[in-house]
Each structure stands twice: as C-alpha cells, then as structure tokens.
Image: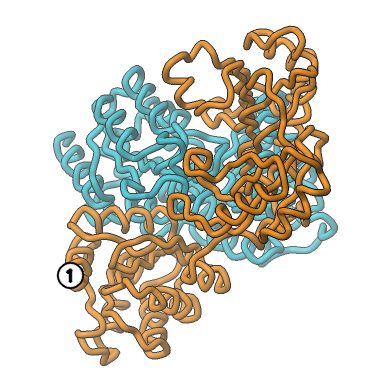
C-alpha cells in the first residue's frame, strides 16, 4: 500500500523523523486555516501518488492568505496525469542549503536490507543512478544486526555529505531504518532530505510503501486503507475478498492461482486481445467464489467476453464445473463465457458443462488455454 | 534419487490439528509420505487419525525421528514455527503459510543462515515439494505427477507459481514423462530456497536429466538463475515466465510479483534465460512441449 506524502510524513513523525510543520485538507478554507496557524510562507502541495507534481503546477509557494486561496483553489480538483487532486498538504516553507537522497528497501537478491544514500538529492534518483552511479552509496544491512549510528555516519561520510550535516543525516538514517523495519515498509524514501542554512537536517518529502501482509500488527494503518483510491470494479472486488486488479481491455479474466491468472493475461495478449482485469480466485473454485467473480467482471462495462481459466489440482474438475454452472444461473451476464477447464477430472467437468443446457451463445468450452484465448478474443471483437 | 525429499523422509506437521494442516497432512500421508507426527502446543497426547500429536517439535523429533517439517500455521506464528523446527534439528522445512510480513521473512532467513545452517527452508507461501512416488509435502495434488522411470529421461521442475507448477506436472504426465522432483519455491520476497539452490541440486541429481523452470515478474531471481545456468548447469532446460503483460507498479497476487522502476520485467528475464541457453516458451503449454522435444532428443 502506497501512502500519500502527508501520510508518509505523519508516519515519519511517529518515528521521530523531523518534517516541516503542516497539515492536510480537502478545502480552500481548510488550507487557509492551516496556513494561518503555521505562519507564512507556506507551500501548497497536491496529494497524488504520481511523480512530476511540481512540473504540473501541483506545488506552489504562498506568502499570504490571498495566495493560499488562489493556489489551493487551483490545485484542488486539478488532474495530474489522470490523478484528480482531492487533498492538499500545507506546510511551512523551508530554506534549503543542500538536498540529499536516502532510502531503505529490501534487496531480494541479497536477502538483506539496502540503504541507498546520495549527496545528490531532489532529482530523480534513477537518473542519478544512470548518469553518476558512483554518487549513490549502497549499504547492505543484515536484518538481525540492524543499523548502528556509527555505520550510518560512515555511510554518510562515504556519500560525501558535508561534515556539518553528518550527525544530522546519521541520526535521521537510524530513525528512517527503524521506520522501515518496525513500521513494516516495503520502501521508506526521503527525497529530498534537506540541510537548512541553520544546520538542521529534515525530510522535505516522504515516499512510503507499506507491506500489506503486516497490517495485522498495525491498527493505525486503517486510516490509510480508507484513502486507497479504487475504481468501482476494484471496490466491489475488495468487498468480495477477491484478488482483483482492473485493467483497460475487453476480455474479462477469471483464473485460479496468481501465476495462472498472469499467464492468462499473457496468452490473451499473445493472440491479439487485451485483458480487462487480473482476477485470481485462488485454489478452490466453488459456486460462491465463481458467482462473486462473475459479478465483479459483469460490472465492467468494457468487458465483451469472459475467459475462465481453471486448472483443477486438489479442486477437481467436476466441482469447478458445478460451481460455474451454478454461478452462470445466478448472474445475469452481459458477455459470453469461454471456459478452459483442465487438470484433475477435467473430462468429467467438461461433460457437466456440456450437459448443463447452457446455450453456446452464453458458454463455450475449449480444451486448451490457447484455443480458449483465441475464442474469447474473437468474441470480444 | 530425487532432490531434498524421498521415500525415507519422515515428516511432522506443525499445525496438524488446524484446518489446513489436517487436510493437507492427511492427503500427504494418503499419497504415501511418511507423516509421523503433528505438533500443536497444548495438545500432546492427542492424535489426528492415528498421527500422534506433540507439544513441541523437539518432543516430536525425539519420539519419531522426524527430519522434515510441514508448517501450516497462521502468518503471525510462522516465523517462530520455522525457528522452532530449526532448533530441533529439522533439516528440511516446508512453510505453505501465505501472508508472512516481508520483514519477518528477512529476519527469519538471516537467523537460519547465522544459527542453523543445517536447516533448509522452502517457502513461505509455497505449494511445497513432491518427489513423485516417494514423498509429497504441501498442497500439490499428487495424482497429477508422473513418477520417474528407471530408464529415464526424467525432468525436474522448479517454480515460483503454484497453479503453473500443476500445469507443468500435468502436461508432462499427459506425455508420459516422469518427474524426479517438483519444487514450488513460492512467490514471496524472501524465499528460503531459491531457483539457484534447486538448479544446483537438479544438476547434481543423477535421476534428473532435464529441468523446467517457471518464473514470474518481480525481483531478480530469474536473472540470477540465468547466470548460474550459464556457469554450472549442463542439463537441457525449458522455461516460462508469467507476467509479460503485467502493468508496472501493480502487485499481481503474490507480494513478490511486481514490476517496479522498470525492473523485474518478464522480457528481461526471458532474454537472460535465452542467453543462458534455456528454451523459453511464451505460455506454459509451449514450455511443456519444448520440454517434450528435449526429452525425445535425450532418448
């Protein structure tokens, strides 16, 4: 789960990482109120989860109440690369002497934590990595040893952070690492991490991605969950506890298993079609699950055919077939189904489908993934 | 021969009295696996259809000589269960638990590495392992796996995805091709056993003559495998990578299956494997038929 900047900053603050005083609001009046209480100058920042906010006009400096009104009014409702701005974050503007970059992630290849630190912050770190890889210090951290203040300071030194900022940077690194580990982040990134002319170091931006698997020990994440932006299809899928991701195509996909679902998208693409979604109904494929899945797919106006791709392992073919027949009876489908049923007792399953009396205009059975994909793509044309 | 587990493997099930543990533990026993014990704290003295239950892994090992563990406990309890098995001297731990936090996985793996180098972990969030005809630990449907033939050639399977693993097993069975061992390493960010670990074992296993590898988007495990194959694997291979069309930044079911910052794409992985001499299919069926061709050429 990716956090908005304001949530990331609030999360940082929990771990003692210094951020600019500020608050979030959904209205112009709210923006004015916040600005008046923290004092001018302030920065009005669009809260969207997409890069390039500044260039799009989503970040503005305001030195008085009139400017806050003007900028907040312009930014709220603005469309930035398809993301509509619902909230703005108002914070006290900072004087900047230098800008750095710091992040913690998990290096899956090394199976260790990875610190990336650079004295060249405030720009796209991928660009720095491409142009000047030497400018980024990479430090692997054993998850059971952790990061000491001394090692953090050494890393900062190695990254050519100036002497005046070393202690401040090291202190923030240790806190950011704690936020990353205890806070169960997939990513905890500060870009830019700034040095003020007065000598303090603090986080001017926050990019935090949380590991959903750890939500059981973070009741405080509920408020972040509430702001996750989903389209109507995704909302319905979430209510029904389905692993669903909405896409733009015209072939609705239902498969059992994440790998098979991904593979189904690939095969549809390979034969010239486009998938409307990713949907994994997991190992079992009973009537309840199948009904929920078909309801979600049916709510997607772009869907012109539905490809059900099931491989029976422990769940036998005949059980899957019965589930599909029952679900087709329950849901008034707008698009025809092409089903590929394979694996344990697949033949019996196919016979059940054939004998169910569902007209071929509603349901076609194909023996292989490729044939089924071709039929589904043809129907979606 | 087979890799990691065989007919001599004695399995205990941590969480045997729970829904998943009971269901799969009994299925594994019905397949012919030596399921010798269950472990649930506070339930010592009970049994599950004749399988004795113990309070701790150490007690179960002392009483039954178990050397492998099948962990089917909730995500909160999984890291402690893995370390308990390691402490009791279990050599091979299969953890099917889905939803273990990545930070816990990283710490658990680092602890195993430092304190229990004799223990190998498969998973978490994996379908398990089957050496057809000998031992099945986990959720694989044993009947879709063709046992290896004495004369060969037999195929080893290693996969990051559950259902695609079944698909591979099934297609080989349709063609009458035997499988030495099929390992599902799981799709989580820190898998205990990687592609490279399995490839090394298959390369050394005289009963394995060819290898199928099934990968997916995210991470760099397939690229590392390709590097290893170039240097160390002489047995012929076919492969399939799921997620060619997956959009960047979206997790496709597994925590690990995500293309981020342009890294971990299917195309990059396929290119790396092709460069390592692996025949790459564009869908699972194609990877299966490529393997059938390889097997025919070995006969």
Task: Indicate left or right for B139 with B166 as reference.
Answer: right
**Chain that appears cyan:** B
At x 26%, y 50%, the residue is: B283
Above or below — where is A29 with respect to A361?
Answer: above
Secondary-structure class at tag 1: loop
Which of B127/A156 is in front? A156
Which of B286/A117 is in front? A117
At x 40%, y 71%, the residue is: A316
Q: Residues within 10 Å of mark 1 (few under 14, many from 20)?
A: few
Badge 1: chain ID: A
Name the spot of residue A167 as percent of width and height, x first: 80, 15
Name the spot of residue B104 as percent of width and height, x first: 69, 40
At x 42%, y 16%, the residue is: A131
In the picture, which quadrant includes the C terminus of chain B? top left
Which of B269/B109 is in front? B269
Report whether residue A359 is seen: yes
Report whether residue B38 is seen: no
Way the structure is coloured = by chain
Name the spot of residue A139 as percent of width and height, x first: 62, 18
**Quarter where residue A86 is shown:** bottom right
Task: Indicate left or right for B135 with A271 as reference.
Answer: right
Above or below — where is A163 with respect to B84?
Answer: above
Tint of chain A: orange
Name the spot of residue B41 as percent of width and height, x first: 82, 54
Residue beneath disc 1: A381
Above or below — where is B233 with respect to A219?
Answer: above
At x 51%, y 70%, the residue is: A237
**Quarter where residue B2 is shown:** top left
Above or below — where is B280 with respect to A304?
Answer: above
**Quarter where residue B163 is shown:** bottom left
In the picture, which quadrant includes the N terminus of chain B? top left
């Amino acid at each position: 789960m990716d956090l908005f900047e304001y949530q990331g900053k609030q999360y940082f603050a929990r771990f003692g990482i210094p951020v600019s005083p500020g608050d979030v609001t959904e209205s112009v009046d709210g923006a004015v109120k916040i600005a008046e209480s923290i004092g001018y100058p302030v920065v009005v920042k669009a809260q969207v989860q997409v890069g390039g906010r500044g260039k799009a006009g989503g970040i503005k400096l305001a030195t008085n109440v009139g400017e806050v009104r003007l900028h907040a009014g312009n930014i709220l409702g603005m469309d930035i690369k398809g993301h509509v701005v619902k909230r703005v974050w108002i914070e006290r503007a900072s004087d900047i002497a230098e800008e750095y970059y710091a992040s913690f992630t998990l290096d899956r290849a090394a199976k260790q934590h990875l610190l990336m630190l650079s004295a060249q912050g405030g720009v796209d770190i991928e660009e720095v990595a491409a142009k000047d890889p030497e400018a980024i210090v990479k430090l692997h951290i054993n998850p059971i040893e952790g990061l000491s203040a001394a090692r953090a300071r050494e890393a900062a030194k190695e990254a050519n952070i100036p002497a005046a900022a070393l202690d401040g940077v090291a202190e923030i690194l240790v806190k950011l690492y704690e936020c990353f580990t205890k806070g169960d982040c997939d990513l905890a990134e500060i870009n830019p991490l700034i040095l003020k002319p007065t000598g303090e170091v603090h986080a001017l931006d926050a990019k935090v991605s949380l590991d959903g698997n750890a939500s059981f020990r973070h009741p405080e994440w509920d408020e972040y969950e509430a702001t996750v932006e989903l389209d109507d299809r995704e909302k319905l899928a979430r209510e029904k506890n389905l692993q669903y991701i909405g896409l733009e195509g015209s072939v609705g996909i239902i498969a059992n298993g994440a790998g098979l679902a991904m593979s189904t998208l690939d095969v549809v693409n390979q034969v010239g079609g486009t998938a409307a979604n990713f949907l994994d109904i997991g190992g079992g494929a009973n009537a309840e699950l199948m009904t929920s899945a078909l309801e979600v797919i049916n709510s997607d106006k772009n869907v012109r055919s539905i490809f059900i791709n099931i491989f029976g392992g422990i769940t036998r073919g005949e059980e899957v077939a019965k589930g599909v027949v029952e679900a087709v009876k329950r849901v008034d489908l707008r698009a025809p189904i092409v089903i590929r049923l394979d694996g344990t007792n697949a033949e019996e399953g196919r016979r059940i489908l054939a004998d169910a009396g569902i007209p071929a205009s509603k349901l076609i059975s194909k023996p292989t993934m490729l044939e089924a994909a071709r039929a589904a793509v043809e129907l979606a044309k | 021969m087979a890799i990691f587990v065989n007919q001599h493997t004695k399995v205990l099930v941590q969480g045997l009295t729970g829904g998943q543990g009971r269901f799969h533990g009994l299925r594994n026993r019905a397949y012919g696996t030596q399921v010798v014990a269950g472990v649930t704290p506070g339930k010592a003295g009970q049994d599950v259809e004749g399988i004795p239950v113990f309070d701790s892994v150490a007690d179960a090992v002392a009483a039954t000589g178990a050397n492998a563990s099948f962990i089917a406990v909730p995500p909160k309890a999984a890291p402690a269960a893995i370390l308990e098995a390691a402490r009791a001297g279990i050599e091979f731990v299969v953890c099917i638990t889905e939803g273990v936090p990545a930070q816990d996985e990283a710490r658990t793996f680092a602890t195993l590495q430092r304190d229990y180098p004799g223990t190998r972990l498969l998973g978490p969030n994996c379908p398990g392992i089957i050496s057809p005809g000998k031992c099945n630990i986990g959720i694989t449907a044993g009947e879709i796996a063709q046992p290896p033939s004495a004369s060969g050639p037999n195929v080893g399977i290693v996969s990051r995805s559950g259902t695609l693993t079944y698909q591979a097993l099934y297609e080989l069975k349709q063609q009458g091709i035997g499988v030495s061992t099929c390992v599902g390493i799981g799709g989580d960010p820190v898998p205990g056993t990687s592609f490279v670990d399995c490839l090394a074992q298959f390369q050394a296993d005289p009963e394995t003559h060819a290898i199928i590898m099934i990968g997916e988007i995210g991470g760099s495990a397939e690229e590392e495998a390709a590097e290893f194959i170039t240097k160390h694997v002489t047995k012929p291979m076919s492969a399939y990578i799921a997620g060619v069309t997956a959009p960047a930044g979206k997790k496709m079911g597994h925590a690990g299956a995500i293309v981020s910052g342009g890294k971990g794409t299917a195309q990059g992985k396929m290119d790396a494997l092709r460069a390592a001499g692996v025949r790459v299919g564009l869908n699972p069926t194609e990877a299966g038929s490529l393997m059938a061709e390889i097997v025919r050429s070995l006969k």
